[in-house]
Image (tube, grey):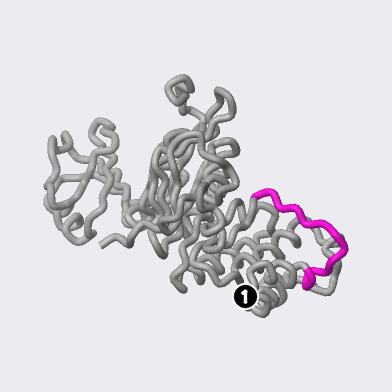
Amino acid sequence: MDAPALIATENLSKAYGGFFALRDLSLNVRQGEVFGLLGPNGSGKTTTIRLLLGLLRPSEGRATVVGFDCWRQSLQVRRLVSYLPGELRMTGSMSGLGVLKYLSGLREDESLDRAVAIAEQVMKLNLRRSVRKYSTGMKQKLALAQAFADPVDILILDEPTSALDPSARADVLTLIREARGQGQTVIFSGHVLSEIEAVCDRVAILRLGRLVHVEDMHARRRLRMLLIRFAGDPPATFPEELELTVREPQGAAVLLEHRGPLGPLLRWLATVDVEDVAIGTEDLHSLYNQYHGPDVVVNEDALS
């Protein structure tokens, strides 16, 4: 049974004059899942996040977090959420520790000790150093330490790895997995396919402000691609119990999707006359290219 929806949008839209940055977005984010927002710059990811936080007023539709309306009850929503913005500004003469003390003090909670531990032990930051001397990546690490330390049920991370080196990126993915393991719900916005694929339970693909696809990543990880070359003509149909879907016929060869157990498939293959069988997997990049690949032609008028 699916977990209940913690976050929901219904026909959510944001327009600037005649331009829609987001249009008719309807989706649910379940409690305890890592939900990815995937798409290039300008696809509507950050607009979606700002609408969820009540930082923007929707032009149409609505969004709710734990039943609270994201615009009319934005204060209640923000109390439930830890947010890492995609465009991080951190200035002033405070030390890294001073920034963490300030941020943890805003909630009047006990997150400081955990934030310091993440910053020093995971992110390897010198918290005595002034943030003026921090690089962009170091500032992002500091903000991430606070975001993961906040004792909240929902994390919203907008491009959390954008300024980080590969080692720190891996650390962030580990922290996301740990957050899920503790029952937190995570919205992870990004465009690095391998990162989204590694940690997300479901992924929403956005294009030109529209939701074009939602993928269950657990089902996708069970997906196999088979290229079977038959000795003669391929069968007109395949046994239903094998859960095979024809992707592309290629003469005597057929490209198939397989989502079922491997045993029955192998037993069936032993009964048919084939010349060659190749079994592989299909990564998120293949799915993404169906909507954002170089050969995709989109009628933008149809999306407006």
Towards the viewer: 226 or 244: 244
Q: What residue did someone put label 1 on?
A: 109
Q: Position of residue 284 (x, y in %)?
A: 44, 48
Neighbor class of circle 1 (other Cα within 10 Å; few <14, some 14-19, many 20+) is few
Residue at left 51%, top 69%?
179
The part of the image, by quadrant, that contains residue 252 is top left
Image quadrant holding the N terminus, namely bottom left
> Taking 260 as reference, is 121 above or below it?
below
The part of the image, by quadrant, that contains residue 113 is bottom right
Q: Looking at the image, can residue 100 be seen? A: yes
**Callout 1: SS:** loop
Residue at left 49%, top 60%?
186
Q: Position of residue 22 (x, y in %)?
A: 50, 35
Towards the viewer: 3 or 298: 3
Q: Position of residue 71 (x, y in %)?
A: 52, 47
How many marks are shown on the rendered structure?
Answer: 1
Classified by dominant secondary structure, the portion drawn in magenta counts as loop
Residue placed farthest to the front in the image? 72
Q: Position of residue 135 (x, y in %)?
A: 80, 58
Q: Amino acid type of disc 1?
A: Asp
Q: Residue 88 magenta-drawn?
A: yes
Which residues are drawn in magenta?
86-98
Towards the viewer: 27 or 284: 27
Q: Residue 100 magenta-drawn?
A: no
> Taking 202 as reference, is 15 above or below it?
above
Q: Looking at the image, can residue 292 be seen? A: no
Q: Is residue 274 left or right of residue 133?
A: left
Residue at left 25%, top 41%?
229
Q: Is residue 69 left or right of residue 75?
A: left
Residue at left 19%, top 39%?
231
Q: Is residue 48 left or right of residue 242?
A: right
> Taking 85 as reference, is 133 above or below it?
below
